[in-house]
Image (spheres, helix red, strand yellow):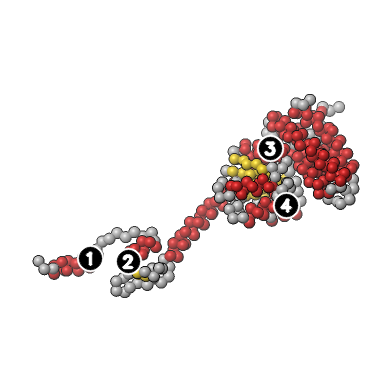
């Protein structure tokens, strides 16, 4: 079984380290900033799906996609992107499934980020 | 030089700020479009950021709308705008550039690419400033030339000239105020001869 940090689909740490110029402290700070906003972002997405609010879902999913992309968290970026695309259709077909995919992606990302920030 | 970063996402904003500060820029940050516009309004006529790095989609005024406002507001037209966007499609980018953006980077951005694009912006700002200064110089020179153009009424007897206010004044005072000329006073040979004759004719 590969080491935890070898899962670059969840978090591409080598790519992140390259972007921050090898500054580990900055990488950890970015992880913390992402975690600080994460619960609110997920709550906004969940509420928008449940209330079938297309515009709110698009904006919230777009925000999470951008943030995850900057952090090089590929799975969460892709799952958020799928929700953003779904928000383009008024029917919101597949939104619940996409939300579950996002939850799964976050479940593997959170421990990685918590490790970076020293929470575990 | 001063640069504004307007980005609602804390992660991306921090990365933008660190990248630009490492390049030696004086970075001002805004967390949404309204705050970004307030920065410009507050600094208008003083120390307006030369470059703005704007997120396309953010709460409040969107980046694309800020582009339009900057390019239609006197005092802000020369701000060089780089849009940060996750919209990579050609139509989207064309739309962004048509709204007034000078350039764009796509999310997630590459610091090396951002640096290159900001340096292009820096060169453009310097070039525009230099051109603006030259235009001001040329306009001033042109205004100067225009003041000395046209018909100038001159009295055929006393040689005074009539100025724009319809007053007759000495030629030297007219040209002193209407050009860069300075007169040095002297006496020509003909007048010297005439003056000497007049002096000789004076009763002893």
Callout 3 secondary element: helix
Distance between the alpha carbons at the discs numbered 4 and 3? 24 Å
Residue B41, position as x, y percentages in the image: 61, 49
The spot of residue A37 in percent (x, y) is 76, 37
Which mark is on residue B170? 2
Judging from the image, mark 1 belongs to the subunit labelled B
Residue B104 in sight from this viewpoint = no
Disc on the earlier residue, 4 or 1: 4
Q: Which mark is residue B65?
A: none
Chain letter behind tag 3: B
Dividing the picture into quarters, in which one does residue B98 lie?
A: bottom right
Q: Which residue is mark 4?
A: B93
Q: What whole-number distance in Å separates the C-alpha atoms at marks 2 and 4? A: 65 Å
Q: Chain of mark 2?
A: B
| Dot 1 alpha-carbon crowd within 10 angstroms: few under 14, some 14 to 19, many 20 or more | few
Labels 2 and 3 positioned on one and the same chain: yes
């Amino acid at each position: 079984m590969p080491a935890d940090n070898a899962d670059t689909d969840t978090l591409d740490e080598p790519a992140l380290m390259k972007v921050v110029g090898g500054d580990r402290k900055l990488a950890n700070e970015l992880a913390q900033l992402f975690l600080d906003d994460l619960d609110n972002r997920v709550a906004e997405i969940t509420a928008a799906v449940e209330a079938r609010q297309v515009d709110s879902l698009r904006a919230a999913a777009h925000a999470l996609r951008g943030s995850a992309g900057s952090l090089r968290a590929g799975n969460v970026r892709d799952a958020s992107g799928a929700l953003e695309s779904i928000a383009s259709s008024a029917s919101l077909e597949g939104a619940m499934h996409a939300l579950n995919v996002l939850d799964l992606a976050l479940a593997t990302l959170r421990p990685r980020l918590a490790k970076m920030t020293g929470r575990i | 030089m001063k640069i504004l970063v307007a980005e609602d996402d804390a992660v991306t904003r921090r990365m933008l700020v660190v990248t630009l500060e490492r390049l030696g820029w004086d970075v001002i940050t805004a967390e949404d479009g309204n705050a970004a516009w307030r920065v410009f309004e507050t600094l208008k006529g003083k120390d307006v950021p030369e470059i703005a790095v704007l997120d396309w989609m953010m709460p409040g005024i969107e980046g694309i709308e800020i582009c339009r406002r900057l390019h239609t507001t006197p005092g802000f037209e020369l701000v060089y705008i780089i849009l940060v966007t996750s919209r990579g499609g050609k139509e989207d980018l064309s739309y962004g550039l048509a709204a007034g953006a000078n350039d764009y980077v796509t999310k997630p951005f590459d610091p090396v690419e951002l640096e290159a694009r900001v340096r292009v912006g820096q060169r453009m700002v310097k070039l525009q400033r230099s051109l603006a200064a030259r235009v001001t110089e040329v306009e001033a020179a042109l205004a100067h030339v225009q003041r000395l153009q046209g018909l100038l009424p001159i009295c055929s007897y006393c040689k005074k000239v009539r100025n724009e206010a319809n007053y007759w004044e000495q030629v030297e005072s007219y040209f002193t105020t209407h050009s860069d000329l300075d007169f040095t006073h002297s006496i020509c040979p003909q007048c010297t001869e005439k003056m000497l004759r007049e002096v000789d004719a004076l009763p002893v």
